[in-house]
Amino acid sequence: MRIIRASEIGRYLYCKRSWFYHLQGIQPANTRELNLGTELHAAHGRKVAGSLLLRWVAIIIFIVAFFIIVSSLVN
């Protein structure tokens, strides 16, 4: 019995011809472009992760500043 992996289902749903070629062992002719696209997606993912980190840092700084202002007004 052959195991069907989720990535294979994803490949089939995205492009049936790509799935068929992959089963036949045929490599794509545009591997350089595909690798470049993978690198660009990875770089974008790193930027998104960095922006999320900066967002949390900004929220923490805002909360600390808020408590400093409130404590200075109370005293």
Image (cartoon, rainbow, N blue to C red):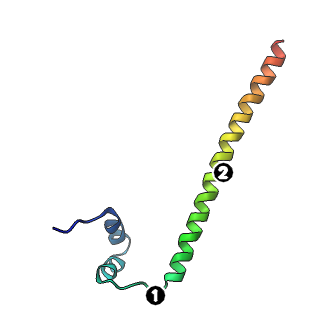
Query: Judging from the image, what secondary structure is the residue with disc 1 in?
Result: loop
Query: Based on the displayed image, in which of its 4 quarters is residue 47 positioned?
Result: bottom right
- Badge number at residue 29: 1
Residue 34 pos. (x, y %): 51, 77
* Residue located farthest toward the bottom when viewing the structure as drawn: 29
In the rendered image, the vertical position of residue 16 relative to residue 74, given as above or below: below
* Residue located farthest toward the top when viewing the structure as drawn: 75
Q: Amino acid at mark 2?
A: Ser
Residue at the image position 49 percent from the left and 82 percent from the top: 31
Q: Amino acid at mark 1?
A: Ala
Query: Judging from the image, what secondary structure is the residue with disc 2 in?
Result: helix
- Say few, some or many: other residues with alpha carbon within 10 Å of mark 2 (under 14 / 14 to 19 / 20 or more): few
- Badge number at residue 71: none
Q: CA distance from mark 1 to mark 2?
A: 35 Å
Residue at the image position 32 percent from the left and 71 percent from the top: 12
Horizontal arrangement in the rendering, residue 17 relative to residue 46 (left or right):
left
In the rendered image, the vertical position of residue 49 relative to residue 18, given as above or below: above
Horizontal arrangement in the rendering, residue 37 relative to residue 71 (left or right):
left
Residue 63 pos. (x, y %): 71, 30
Residue 74 pos. (x, y %): 81, 13
> Which part of the image, by quadrant, shows the N terminus?
bottom left
Earlier residue among tags 1 and 2? 1
Horizontal arrangement in the rendering, residue 1 relative to residue 24 (left or right):
left
Q: Nearer the viewer, residue 59 or 42?
A: 42
> Which part of the image, by quadrant, shows the C terminus?
top right
- Badge number at residue 51: 2
Horizontal arrangement in the rendering, residue 22 relative to residue 63 (left or right):
left
Q: Nearer the viewer, residue 21 or 14?
A: 21
